[in-house]
Amino acid sequence: MAERKENSTNSLNRKCIVESNDLSYAIDMVGGRWKLLILVNLEKKKLRFNEIQKAMSNITERMLTLQLRELENDGLISRTVYAEVPPRVEYELTEISTELIPIWKKLCAWGAKHRKTRV
């Protein structure tokens, strides 16, 4: 899978967002459809790729791979490769991402409350 070109519109937009303010930076780190859900699935224990994919049945293999790479590059998850045949790879939250746990729990509670008002 190709890396983004440094001068692509997408890369320039991300750079602009990340440099603008702390809230934009934080949203960029966990924003999108899948990143926060991946982190939530890793809350309790290390998981292998297939375990994450099973927990998130609607995500494609390609998208999960891309999102895991971004989360790893951003320092929110760590990836451990074991020298076995077949290779075993596990993902887990980093120390900095565990600080997000109370935040996503509050966000979940807010979502449940808001959903009730919309029905």
Image: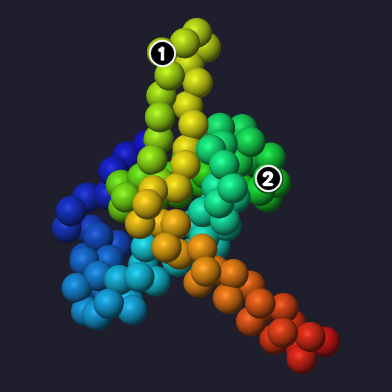
- Tell me, yes or no, whether the two marked residues, 2 and 1, touch with CB atoms within 8 Å: no
Q: Tell me residue 67's x, y (percent).
A: 45, 49
Q: Tell me residue 58's x, y (percent).
A: 68, 50
| Residue 13 can be seen in this image | no
Can you say which quadrant of the picture contains the N terminus?
top left
Q: Dividing the picture into quarters, in which one does residue 108 lie?
A: bottom right
Residue at image coords 17%, 58% = 7
- The mark total stands at 2
Residue at image coords 50%, 72% = 103
Q: Dividing the picture into quarters, in which one does residue 99 lie?
A: bottom left
Residue at image coords 63%, 40% = 53
In the image as oriented, which residue stretches furthest toward the bottom? 117
| Residue 54 can be seen in this image | yes
Q: Earlier in the sequence, mark 2 or mark 1?
A: 2
Could you classify mark 2 by the number of other residues whose Cα lies within 10 Å: few (under 14), some (14-19), or many (20 or more)?
few
Q: Tell me residue 21's x, y (percent).
A: 24, 80
In the image, taking residue 82 as reference, residue 50 lies left or right, namely right
Label 2 residue SS: helix
- Disc 2 to disc 1, how far (Cα)? 25 Å
Q: Tell me residue 115's x, y (percent).
A: 74, 82
Residue marked by disc 1: 83
> Which residue type does callout 1 highlight?
Ala
Is residue 5 positioned above or below 11 on the image? above
Could you classify mark 1 by the number of other residues whose Cα lies within 10 Å: few (under 14), some (14-19), or many (20 or more)?
few
Can you say which quadrant of the picture contains the C terminus?
bottom right
> Which residue type does callout 2 highlight?
Ala
Residue at image coords 47%, 38% = 91
Residue toward you, 12 or 39: 39
Q: Where residue 55 is drawn, which disc sits there?
A: 2
Nearer to us of marks 2 and 1 is 1
